[in-house]
Image (cartoon, rainbow, N blue to C red):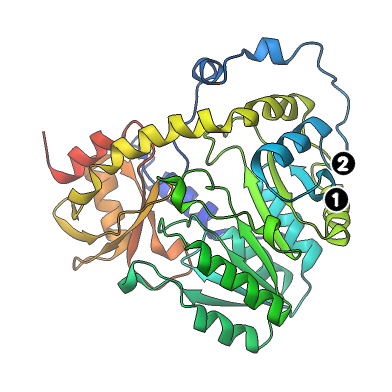
Amino acid sequence: MNNFPKLAMARFSKRISDQFSHQKLIPMHNTNPQPFTQGELEQTIGCSFDSILQNVNLGFTPDAGTLALRQTLMDCHYENISIEDVVTHAGAQEALFCAFYALLKENDKVLAVAPIFEPLVQIPLNIGCEVSYVHLQAENNWALDLGEVEENFKLGCRLFVINFPHNPTGATLTENDLLKIVALCKKYDVWLLSDEVFRGLEHSVDYRLPAVADIYDKGISVGVISKAFAIPGIRVGWLVCKNQQFIDEVIDIKGYISICNSQIDELLASVILKKHEQLTARNLAIILQNKTLLAGLNNLLNQKVEIVVPNVGCCLFAQVKAKMDANSLLEKVATQSQYLLYPSNLFKTDLEALRIGFGNHQFSEFFKKVKGES
């Protein structure tokens, strides 16, 4: 038996694919905005792929990533880091894998915010860590109880895992609350891993949080081009941390996985991510147009649901208030409307809820179908 994480989300995707194999389901659970096409992306950034990829070096990239991409990330996406603090990866999942294996060992205590995207805790569980959860308060607009966080820290904690803007609820923190979390981490000597893949999708810049790596020496910020920037076809993620011993360990572990990214992907990303404001402006235009419909999303196929309209990101967690459970409602939506949602049992919570994405061009049609509108 191998020691690699077994992800319920992957098993669920296989099961649901088998169950509805005779249908072509449209994903409406996605957390990233509508992916760019190459033509749209080139128009948005003002240059073509051909112009970027002139006589590209097809050798190996440096272990930590190309200087060009790391420089772009340092200059355009963070405030208080050096180029040595950045390591690029083949997506955010690899960054998380390397971070957890660099930092954790068996029996370490990890605290995570739930509901939670499963890989953020499944890898620590696979390592043999003791994982506890502080649950966002559904009855209080998905608020985080900082008193409960501190009570867990008092019991001993190696790492606190957060994800704001939050998947799946669409919740966020105030900057003051984030600073309080950092102060608690310093007080109890806790590492802080911040999954920031949706940073940039705040519906107003007033909701933008500082990157954890900018404000805490034991803070780890994880980013990716696929989520906030809607380019999953370019496989580039990264992590940032000021602790050089940790960074060295991450690079060592990366050497057993991808070794390095593609020169082509890193060169494209180094240019594209300089235009991050144009990318997110396009994405937010889609999100905010769809957001106008959310106030009317109080039922799915006449089954009552309750939502909190997010101010960040493009996903929400619709609590099922009908007699049926989340999985039954998921199957009803899939069978009757041909849309695929994700149920709450994938997110380490006892709530009955469904994750719905509203960052794509199909959302208005989905809304009409599940609301019974013509």
Vertical comparison of 66 with 113: above or below:
above
Q: Name the residue at 51% across, 69% down.
A: 177
Whether the residues at callouts 2 and 1 have beta carbons within 8 Å, the answer is yes
The location of residue 203, given as percent across then percent down, is 40, 45
State the quadrant of the C terminus. Answer: top left
Q: Is residue 298 above or below residue 108?
A: above
- Checking the image for residue 251, the label placed there is 1
User: Residue at left 75%, top 66%?
Assistant: 218
Q: Quadrant of residue 52?
A: top right
Tell me where residue 321 sits by quadrant: bottom left
Inter-mark Cα distance, 2 to 1: 7 Å
Residue 99, position as x, y percentages in the image: 75, 58
What kind of residue is marked 1? Ile
Quadrant of the snapshot with the N terminus: bottom right
Splitting the image into 4 quarters, where does residue 284 fall?
top left
Most foreground residue, 275 or 344: 275
Under tag 2, what secondary structure? loop
Q: Which mark is residue 63?
A: 2
Residue 118, compared with residue 41, is above or below; it is below
Closer-to-camera residue (276/342):
276
Q: Position of residue 122 (x, y in %)?
A: 62, 64
Q: Is residue 68 above or below residue 135?
A: above
Q: How many marks?
A: 2
Name the one closer to the observer, 134 or 322: 134
On the question of residue 144 being in view, the answer is: yes
Asked whether, in this view, residue 125 is left or right of residue 325, the answer is: right
Q: Residue at x 29, y 43 (%)?
A: 291
Q: Amino acid at mark 2?
A: Asp
Query: How packed is label 1: few (under 14 Cα within 10 Å), some, or many (20 or more)?
Result: many
Is residue 338 toward the left or the right of residue 126 in the image? left
**Residue 363: image tag:** none
Residue 34 appears in view:
no
